[in-house]
Image: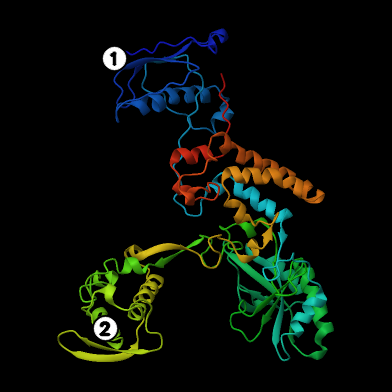
Amino acid sequence: MNKSVKPKKSARTPLSRGLSPVISVRGAREHNLQDITVELPRDQLVVITGLSGSGKSSLAFDTIYAEGQRRYVESLSAYARQFLELMQKPDVDSIDGLSPAISIEQKTTSRNPRSTVGTVTEIHDYMRLLWARVGVPYSPATGLPIEAQTVTQMVDRIMAMGEGTRLYLLAPIVRGRKGEYRKELAELQKKGFQRVKVDGTLYEIDEVPTLNKKLKHDIEVVVDRVVVREDLQSRLADSLETALDLTDGIAFADDADTDDGKKGRTVFSAKFACPVSGFTIDEIEPRLFSFNNPFGACPSCDGLGVRMTFDPDLIVPDQNKTLAEGAVAPWSNASPPSPYYLQALKGVAKIHGAKIDTPWKKLNKKTRDAIFFGSGDEPILIKFGDGTRKFETRKPFEGVINNLARRWRETDSAWIREELSKYQTSQPCEACEGHRLKPEALAVKIDGKHVSEVSLLSIADAHAWFEALEPKLSSKDTEIARRILRENWRTLGLPQQRRLGIPHPRPQLRHLVWRRESTHPPCLTNRLRPHRRFVCAR
């Protein structure tokens, strides 16, 4: 079968360069192509259409692209060819008028909830760097900028802990870094230090186990062990200065009587600390503003901004059903169904004066709450019988939601988790209010906004905000931020040119910079990706 596409006359014809005005393919038999002959015009956009399996990809990729790429690789030196994969010659009689070719594959969207349009386009990377370099930390308690904390203020704060308090003064020399750190530990021992806390456990320096270099570790050297008393100020000041010198301005005071050191830990910073509330920011680095890094991610939701919670409306989908009819879906749908669940619900209903044959919607709120969230410390009489024996027990009722949450935490079965997930919905994290970041990261602001507030702007508004920011910065900050702002402004301008800054019809999808990438269709995500330049030798 012969087909020919006549080229239209164009001002950009390559005839002046001695090249054919068409790409002529003769006798293409690759895959399901049956001796196809076709002429395609050069310097024009050619679209190949057809039914599935008709040979569109075989002609475009496996024949034309493969031959163009093969010719390009063969034109290189023998040294360069050894680093490239040489494609096989396609099953075709001849292809004329073909230059070296490139193939651009359409990327599929990521299904990772940690991948947002901001991270894919690298906009968020520039924002993290900008807030780390020119951001100003503010105290959540007073709303005022946080200033450096002096050694005297640190000493006063320790003395206020109360006489008799036993403390370890620590200098965190390694925080969340991979490595073995043999050299560092040896140097500490030469300086006279005897003990270190490695990943929360105290060791003599010469007894520290070999660390896994592929895992992240926390290493804190014990500078001093003290008991708070009246005449301790001078010793505290010397020890704190030693700790601050070792760690570039950070020191910890751990309660020696607390098993979990981090719960009884007081952080001191010679750089950023609030004297009123004691709020302290250890360091302001780009990783602090990353929800994909443990140092920046909200510890409550692990940087996702949402938490999966068991939804009462999904647990009881049909409120016309009674408890006896299986109103509590996760318990009634269990395979095999456990008679214990119905006996427990009967005991809870009885103590609240209700019956299990009463429709769910007619039960009072107190009874519903007891079924969902448990009876607290109040014991419930549960009579159990399996047909052969009977017994009764009196103990607090766990509650359906608490029971499902416990099973979710304790199980290692993917099947059980999948079943339980049917009764879950995502809710904004209460700790970070959906911002994904730690309070320390949200306390750092530029022009009154933290990084998440700017990320929630639409592309058009974010573009305007960055454009207006430079005149508001000091001369020093302007010098630091100029290149970052220019790159961010340019990157945000690309979607504007592609008409992606227009608000989405659904309000919750307006914020294209911060939206999860998986919510976008592939074509939109590809238009948002950073440009890549391709050079085609002619």
Q: Nearer the viewer, residue 59 or 324?
A: 324
Q: Amino acid at mark 1?
A: Met
The figure's colour scheme reads rainbow
Image quadrant in which the N terminus is located: top left
Percent position of residue 440, x then y: 65, 65
Q: Residues within 10 Å of mark 1 (few under 14, many from 20)?
A: few
**Residue 80 in the image: x percent, y percent?**
58, 29
| Foreground of the two, 384 or 181 | 384
- Which badge, 1 or 2, comes first in the chain's sequence? 1
Residue 144 on image: x %, y %: 73, 66
Residue 478 higher or lower than 275, as above or below: above
Q: Secondary structure at mark 2?
A: loop
Q: Is residue 347 left or right of residue 467?
A: left
**Residues marked 1 and 2 touching at CB (< 8 Å):** no
Q: Residue furthest right?
A: 234
Amino acid beneath label 2 = Ala
Numbered-mark total? 2
Relative horizontal placement of residue 219, taking residue 83 as reference (left or right): right
Of residues 155 and 167, the one nearer the viewer is 155
How far apart in space, not on screen, are marks 1 and 2 (Cα)? 81 Å
Circle 2 sits on which residue? Answer: 354
- Residue at point 28%, 83% (across, down): 349
- Report if residue 177 is visible in the image: yes
Q: Is the C terminus in the top left, top right, bottom left or bottom right quadrant?
A: top right
Instruction: Say which mark, if any, is on residue 1.
Output: 1
Structural crowding at the residue carrying mark 2, measured as other residues with C-alpha within 10 Å and reported as few (<14), some (14–19) or many (≥20): some
- Identified at 70% across, 88% down, the residue is 165
| Label 1 residue SS | loop
Tell me residue 226's x, y (percent). 74, 86
